[in-house]
Image (cartoon, rainbow, N blue to C red):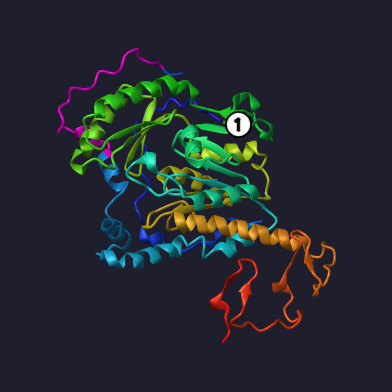
Amino acid sequence: MDVKSTKASLVLADSAPINKSRLGIHSSLLPCSQAGPTFSNNILAISSKKPGKFDDVRSNGWLDAMRSSSPPRENILKNFTSVEVASHDGDIAYRAWMIKYPSALNSFRQIMECAKNRTIVVFLDYDGTLSPIVDDPDRAFMSADMRFAVKRVAKYFPTAIISGRSRDKVYELVRLKELYYAGSHGMDIMFPAEEMASGDRSICTKSTDHQGKEVNLFQPASEFLPMINEVFRTLVEITKNIKGAKVENHKFCVSVHYRNVDENSWPIVAQLVYDVLKEYPRLRITHGRKVLEVRPVIDWDKGKAVEFLLESLGFSTNQDVLPIYIGDDRTDEDAFKVLQSGNRGYGILVSAVPKETNAFFSLRDPSEVKEFLESLVEKRMKRIVIGLEGKLPPQKPLNSNYVDSTSEERRPELLEGKLPPQKPLNSNYVDSTSEERRPELYVE
C-alpha cells in the first residue's frame, strides 16, 4: 500500500449534496444479500494579505465547505425535500430520509440475522458517537453508562475506536484497556504485539502501552511528525487573536476549530490556514464538523485503518466476520465505503438530520448508540445461555428445608405455600432485630 503519495492538493472535496432521487433501499447493497518531506528551520512567515481579501478561500471552495459542515437545520431540510419545511416539521423529513437509511435499532433483527455464525467486529468513532458534540473539545466526555456499554461490548466482540483525536487523548477520555485504539484518523494504531495474525510485521514498531505491556504501533505518517509540529506552532500563533478559535495537535494531524468563532470571522480563519499550507504542498485540508483538519497527503484514512485492523487480527479474508462501524463525521465515510464495497459489513451513521452517506443504517444520537451496543451484548448473552441449555445437571427441587448454600440463609420468597401458618400480627408485635415497635406492621 502506498503511504507516500506525492499529491499536492490542499482540499479534499466534500461529499455530494443530498439528492432525494436516491431514496429507496436496494437489497443488492446489503451485506447479507450475497453468500520524504522537507522542513524549514523557522516558523513560517505569515502572509501579509490584509483580512478581508479572501479570493483564495472563496475560489477553492473552503468557505462553502465550512458553511456546509454544519448548516442551519432549515437549509438541510430544504435541500432534502426541495420545499420549504418548517423547523417543527423536521421529523417528517428525517423519517423520509430513514427510508434510505433505516434505524439500526429498528433493523436490529435483520442485522443479527446476517450475523448468524459470524464474528462481529465493532469499530467506533468517539466525538458525536460515544460523546456529544460540545463547544469545548476538551470537555467531550462520555457518560459512565456509555463507558460501561462499550466495556461490555469489548468483552464479547473485538472492538476498536478510530478517532481524529490523538491516540493518547482518546485513551485518556475512554480509559478502557479492553479496546484497540487508532488515533489521528487511523494514522496511529496500537494493538497487542501477539495479536498480529497476518500482514507485514516489519511495518510496525514495538512500544509499550499504559499498563507497560508490549504492543505494536503502526504509524504510516511518522515522517511527517516534525512538519505537523511546526505547522501546529504556527497556527497557534496566527490564530491567537481570533476569539473562539482553537488549535489542537493530534500528533499526525492538526485541528483548527471554528465552532466558537463568529461566522463573520470564518473567512479570516480559512485564509490564515490557507496561507500557511501554501508552503506545505504535502499537507492537505479536510473538513469536519466546524473544524479544519490539516493532514499529510498520504493514501491513508479511517477506511484503510479498518482494513489494517481486520487484516492484523486475522479477519481480512474471513467470510465468517461481520464488521460494524458507527460514526458521525465526514471522515467516517471512508470507513463506510470500505464496508459497503463487496458487501463486507455495516456502516451506521449517527445523525439527527438528513445527510448523504455511504452507511447502511442510522442512529439519531449517542443515546441510541448506547442502546444499540447494549442490544448487541444482550443478544450475545442470550446465545450463551441457549448454548448452555441442556448441559447443566438437574436442579434439586425447592422445599421447606431449602437453604441457599451461598448465604446459608433461608429463602422464604421461594417457599410460598410451604411454610407453617404465621402468628397474626397484633399491637404487641415487636421487631426482634431492633427491639422497637413497628406500628407500620400492625394489623387492627
Check the picture and name the quadrant holding the N terminus.
Answer: top right
> Left or right: 294 with respect to 393?
left
Q: From this viewpoint, is residue 29 visible?
A: no
Q: Within 10 angstroms of label 1, few (less than 14), some, or many (20 or more) residues?
A: few
Q: What element carries label 1?
A: loop
x and y percentages locating residue 356 in the rendered image: 39, 53
Q: What residue type is labelled 1?
A: Gln
Answer above or below: position of 399 versus 95.
below
Q: Which residue is drawn at 44% across and 36% down?
A: 165
Q: Does the magenta stretch include residue 407?
A: no
Residue 45 belongs to the span the image colors magenta = yes
What residue is rendered at 50% in x and 40% in y? 162
Q: In the displayed structure, does residue 422 sit left or right of residue 88?
A: right
Figure label count: 1
Residue range corresponding to the magenta coloring: 38-62
Residue closer to the observer: 334 or 348: 348
Q: Position of residue 241 (x, y in %)?
A: 21, 30
Q: In which quarter of the image is residue 44?
A: top left
Which residue shows up at 56% across the image and 62% down it? 108
Image location of residue 255, percent across then percent down:
36, 34
Residue for point 58% across, 48% down: 151
Report x, y in % for residue 92. Answer: 35, 68
Q: Which residue lies furthest to the top in this view?
A: 41
Q: Which of 129 and 77 is in front in this view?
A: 129
Residue bearing mark 1:
211
Considering depth in this image, is 442 or 300 the residue closer to the camera? 442
